[in-house]
Structure formats: C-alpha cells, structure tokens
Amino acid sequence: MKVIAIEHPHQFNSDDFPELVMALGFFDGIHKGHQIVIQTAKKKADEMNLKSAVMTFDPHPSAVLGRKTENIRYITPLEDKVDIIESMEIDYLFIVHFSKEFASVLPERFVDEYIAGLNVRHVVAGFDYSYGRYGQGSMEDLPVYAQGRFSQTVVEKQTLEDEKVSSTRIRETLGNGNFSDFYHLAGRRYLTKGHVVHGEKRGRKLGFPTANIEVSDDYIFPAAGVYAVRIKISGKWYYGVCNVGYKPTFHEEKPKYPTVEVHALEFSGDIYGNQVSVEWHTRLRSEKKFSGLEALVAQIETDKQNAIAYFAKLEA
C-alpha cells in the first residue's frame, strides 16, 4: 500500500495517480460500518479494474476546530489506522493534514482538488459523510459537484441491535471497559501499544511481576479496573491480567494519571524499553482498596484464575 501525505493546498495532478476508486471518511476505530465502506470500494475497484484508495484525515477535526485544548484521544491512532487499512489490501492511502485552511475549503473545491484532481473515478462513502467548509457538502450533493467526472456509491446506515454502529458508540463502550461490545461493533479486539517502563516494582515483591506500560495519550483508555488481556512481547502472545488504575491500596492521594500494568502468565524476562501490544478482552472487576497486602495478594490470585478460566472458555 502506498501512503500519500497531503498538505493543503496540494500540488498533485490527476496524472500522478492511476484511476482510483476511493473510500472517504475519518474512519476512527475502523468499525464494521467503516469496514463495509472500505470493502465496497475495494470490490468496486476490482469490478472496474481500477486501483483502490482510502482518504482519511489527521488530526481529528475537533482538534482543529473545537474549543477544547486537551489532547484528542482516538480509538485507532493514525499508526494503527494505517496498519488496519493496509491489512485490508488497499492500494493507496491518502492522509490529508486537517488544518484550519483545509477546513475552510468549499465543497466544490474539495471535489475538484481532492477527488477529481486525484484521478478518482468512483467514490464510496457512508450516507452521512460530509465535506467542505462546515460540512456543507453531502452525498446527495456530490453528483452535482462531480459533473460527470466520477460516479458514487452510498453505503447506508449500519446497525447492531437497532443502534447505529458509530465511533461515538464505540468510544462510550471503551470508556466503560466493555470490550465484548467493542468486539461485536468492530469485529476485532481492541489493541493498544506502548513501551515497558520502570514502575514501583511492588508486583514483583508480591509474587506477581508486572510490565508497567507507558501508553500514548492518543489512545482512549477504559475505566479503572482489572481486565483479562493478551500481551504481545517480542512477537509472541501471552495471556495476562491488566490493572488500569491508581492503586488506592498504596496511595493516599489519587495520582494524576492511572497506571497500566500487565502480569503476563507463563512469562519471565527483562523487557524494559520494549514495545508491547495489549489486546483487551473482558473486564474482571472494578479497582478497590484492600485492607492489607494479604487480601490484595489473594485477590490478584483470584483475578489470575478468572483470566485463565476466561481464556480456557474462549478456546473451547
């Protein structure tokens, strides 16, 4: 897959690319609705004997146009989004830098420069996709702006249990730590990446050594609690138990940021500095404060056994 970074105003011409079928969208999370849009574009490209393409945007429009100044968190940060789209066997990925200047582009100019101007012959997008200044352009308007230069396919609303499959719905699901719902909405497990850093090393003293993972602020993280996870270390997956939280048993005052610690089952070794991936499966319990270390150790052992039972059932 060829990845093309675009700054506005861009200098590309239609001659720079083969004829394309392009899926349009921000695609945060690449959930089942997004997947249908992208798969439809790929199928259409095969039918028309053209190359497939996806156009997405970075950063999120709200990071540029919104009033909030804090960091925007994503279901799939850009690097992960690129990996997933590449796994879908798309030929071209266009990543448009979303700036205030780009946001002010009128719908007609967007179509001229970012669709027709990139040699697109067919567009695929969701029914509610909007484009141009203030999102003024709609899929209903697109044929008017196209002026016969390309055709289009509109993907209708996708629902699960009578609710729209959307990034907003998934964000709420992740915030609650409901990873089984995420799996149903996205068709895959939630994945985060981070580097192993030195922590307080209490787990080792308690007989449950943990990998303290420094995770990018770009990710949406679940509510504090204990989760059954898999952790990928040096290319190999291990079952594990993950604690997301503030460790109230050890801290009188709540730390500013939660920690992410994974006890990998059947693994021992020094992995400080390594990048690891965590695949989130199910919430085991909420975080709680214990009366002493003995009660904490007993609960950790229970968590471990519950995780083992979960994965045994999953594999059955």
Image: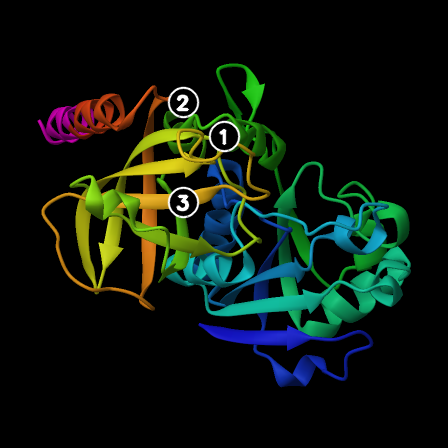
Dot 2: few (<14), some (14–19), or many (≥20) neighbours within 10 Å? few
Farthest-out residue, top = 162
Q: CA distance from mark 2 to mark 3?
A: 17 Å
Task: Indicate the amino acid at tag 3.
Answer: Val
Residue of label 2: 289
Identify which residue, 242 or 88, lies in the foreground. Answer: 242
Relative to 282, does residue 216 appear above or below in the rendering?
below
Residue of label 1: 223
Dot 3: few (<14), some (14–19), or many (≥20) neighbours within 10 Å? many
Label 3 vs label 1, nearer the camera: 3
Mark 1 falls on what kind of element?
loop
Identify which residue, 211 or 10, lies in the foreground. Answer: 211
| Residue 108 appears in the figure | yes
Say which residue appears at 15% left-offset and 41% top-offset: 207
Task: Indicate the amino acid at tag 2.
Answer: Lys
| Residue 136 appears in the figure | no
Q: Return the disc, 1 or 2, that comes first in the chain's sequence.
A: 1
Residues rendered magenta in the picture: 305-316
Q: Return the disc, 2 or 3, that comes first in the chain's sequence.
A: 3
Q: Return the disc, 3 or 1, that comes first in the chain's sequence.
A: 1
Label 1 vs label 2, nearer the camera: 2
Residue 288: percent from the left, percent from the top? 40, 21
Q: CA distance from mark 3 to mark 1?
A: 11 Å
